[in-house]
Image (cartoon, grey):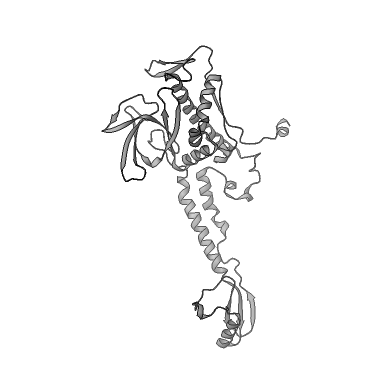
Amino acid sequence: STYYVFGRGVNIAAKDETINDCIQAFLDDPSNQREFSGAQARKERDRELTIDGNLFFVFFVQKDTGKVRIGTLPVDEIDTIIKAPNNRKRNMWYKRSWYAAGTTERKERYYRDHLNNDLRTNLDGIDVDQDAVIYHVKVGGFADWAFGISETYAAQAWAQAYKQFLTNFASVVATLAMFAARKRTSGGTAGVAATRAKLASTLSATNGETNAPRAPGSVSIEASAAEAWDPIKTANATTPATEGKPIKLMVASAFGLPDTFFGDTDTGNLATAQSLDRPTEFQFVDRQELWIGIYQTILNFVVFNAVIAPQGMLIDIARPVENSYEETVIEYNEGINSTINVDFPSILERDTGSLIN
């Protein structure tokens, strides 16, 4: 999924040249490249969101210039999310607990949400970080849930069941492969012993191998009224591996993907760069739309701080004002186009000739 969403990159540019210079400086910062805007960082964040169901971006803002550096906090360090008193869908505070590097010292701290303007320094007797704020992204849950839920959650039990099925299948196949042929001899017990001696390993008791297990391809020697030699027949001796497909489809359904994405190329031949079934295509496009929203939220935060900081890059083209809800917003000078475009290249490589026809 990550390859389809980010495999062809993402294009980010603002209409206004000054605003574009500001956001490109943010995106090009080496620290931000490692955590957010670089190709590897984009894939890592998307995988983390898929597996953990949550991303906790943390913004560090220079007070004089408004420059922003971005990082992420591990999900398991966020103990509590405090909602607004009258709105369970709005995050206000995040309580973080973690161990200091290389020590057993447990630390606690609160962080403001990036849209929370409450500048208190202490909450419930615990310090509030004054140098960083958090932007929380969640998937897989409901709007009033504090945390998201892993997008792989529904697949986990079925994936384990399928793994066990294949493990059992491999064990049976290995067992059936133990004997490759059967030799029947008319010499009774003595004949069995004689034939066994002829086929015995050259290893002796001196090396400690007194009762070695049968190796794959061994011969089963049995007493019989007549001499005979024939291969072991294992046809229909076990449940075929394909019988586990319904279990695999349960895994596929949890991801919302057809089984062609799980190695079954017999079910279709159109899963190429030029064709996807429409629900699958729209699922990847929807994921791109999610990331467009995340990018725009972060970039708007970058622009906001470049306006309100005393030495910010954008103080000459905009100013902070208070709206009717007593919220600080940005008002641009006349003629400034503040649009920031975040565009993904097309997921599919369309054949121009076919489209024209």
Q: Which quadrant of the rendered structure holds the C terminus?
A: top right
Q: Residue 8: image x %, image y %?
A: 60, 36
Q: Compared with residue 138, is residue 258 higher up or lower down, i.e. above or below?
A: below
Residue closest to the eye, 31 or 349: 31
Q: Compared with residue 342, is residue 200 higher up or lower down, i.e. above or below?
A: below
Q: Residue 268: image x %, image y %?
A: 64, 47
For the point 46% across and 43% down, the residue is 51
Residue closest to the eye, 219 or 141: 219
Q: Which quadrant of the rendered structure holds the N terminus?
A: top right
For the point 50% across and 55% down, the residue is 163
Q: Residue 102: image x %, image y %?
A: 36, 45
- Taking the image as shown, residue 200 lies to the left or right of residue 350, namely left
- Is there any visible trace of residue 96 in the rendered image? yes
For the point 51% across and 75% down, the residue is 212
Outermost residue, left direction?
125
Q: Compared with residue 280, is residue 209 higher up or lower down, i.e. above or below?
A: below
Q: In the rendered picture of this protein, how many numbered marks are placed on residues?
A: 0
- Taking the image as shown, residue 107 lies to the left or right of residue 295, namely left
Res 20 → quadrant = top right
Res 347 → quadrant = top right
- Is there any visible trace of residue 91 in the rendered image? no
Q: Compared with residue 248, is residue 131 higher up or lower down, i.e. above or below?
A: above
For the point 57% across and 70% down, the residue is 216
Q: Residue 295: image x %, image y %?
A: 50, 30
Residue closest to the eye, 211 or 61: 61
